[in-house]
Amino acid sequence: MGREIAEQIDLSIDCPLVERILTGFICNEVRRAGFERVVVGLSGGIDSTLVAYLAAAALGPNNVMGVRMPYRTSSEETRVHSRMVAELLGIESPEIPISEQIDTYFERFPDASTLRRANKMARERMTILYDQSAAWHALVLGTSNKTELLLGYGTQYGDLASALNPIGDLYKTQVRQLARHMGVPEQIIRKNPTADLWVGQTDEAELGFTYDEVDRLLVLLVDRRYSRAEAVAAGFEAAFVDR
């Protein structure tokens, strides 16, 4: 019975309704703050792509800037997908590389860990977004989903920093549903999630589990307020619950 509970957790959403709620949220909050335009970091991944789609639907493409900020090790797929999204939406999309400033800084610290470098890159990108928002008189939109926020999977004062975070109450599984509903290209929806912070990095390899697995657990622990014992009784392995 416990295993059945774990396997039957329903994460499906009413996509047309969620689209209306989130586009309305963006439109109302941006204008309530005295702005008409927004800036989003466009990585070519599903989260930033969905936010760009929502923003363009809410405010119009002319009021959305998708900033592309590659590092020298960023994959060609990342670059291609971020350009493709900007072209499909018809939004302004400057490319501002971060290699020079990151490499110059770490010349002083050649033994810095991969994690230090990754966090520095995330924070560099956010300073660029906020500077561009000042230049464009716009608000910065966040791109962190509920799964990442609950797991603490992000960089403080980096990708977690924003004025508004439209997808912050959607689990990763639900992000995929809404992205498909809104017409996000299938190759972006289906590719392995990655922050592209180093060569070969993927979210699920770094976390040690899949988003599908952890989303179902988080629904029980957070949304339904299950205790550890109840989650284990529902069919989740104790070692997984304790991670």
Image (cartoon, rainbow, N blue to C red):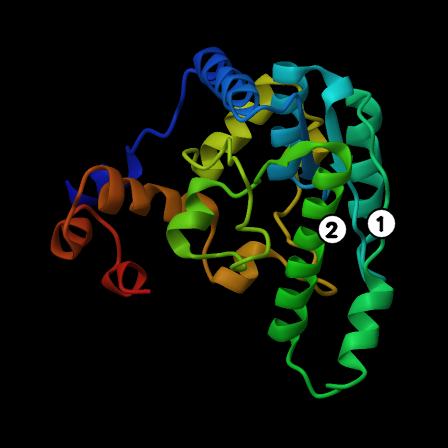
Q: Which residue is drawn at 47% across and 51% down?
A: 210
Eye-nearest disc, 1 or 2: 2
Which residue is under mark 1? 96
- Label disc, if present, on residue 128 of the rendered structure: 2
Q: What residue type is labelled 2?
A: Ile
Given residues 137 and 56, the one toward you in this image is 137
Instruction: Look at the numbered disc 2 and give the secondary structure of its residue.
Output: helix
Which x, y percent locates residue 151? 40, 55
In percent of width and height, residue 56 lies at 68, 20
Q: Residues within 10 Å of mark 2 (few under 14, many from 20)?
A: some
Query: Which residue is painted at 66% across and 67% down in the image?
Result: 120
Count residues near mark 1 (Cα–Cα under 10 Å), then give few for <14, some for 14-19, many for 20+. some
Question: Split into 4 quadrants, where in the image is the C terminus?
Answer: bottom left
**What's the distance in space between the residues labelled 1 and 2, CA to CA?**
8 Å
Q: Work out whether 204 lies above or below 26.
A: below
User: Disc 1 or 2, which lies upstream in sequence?
Assistant: 1
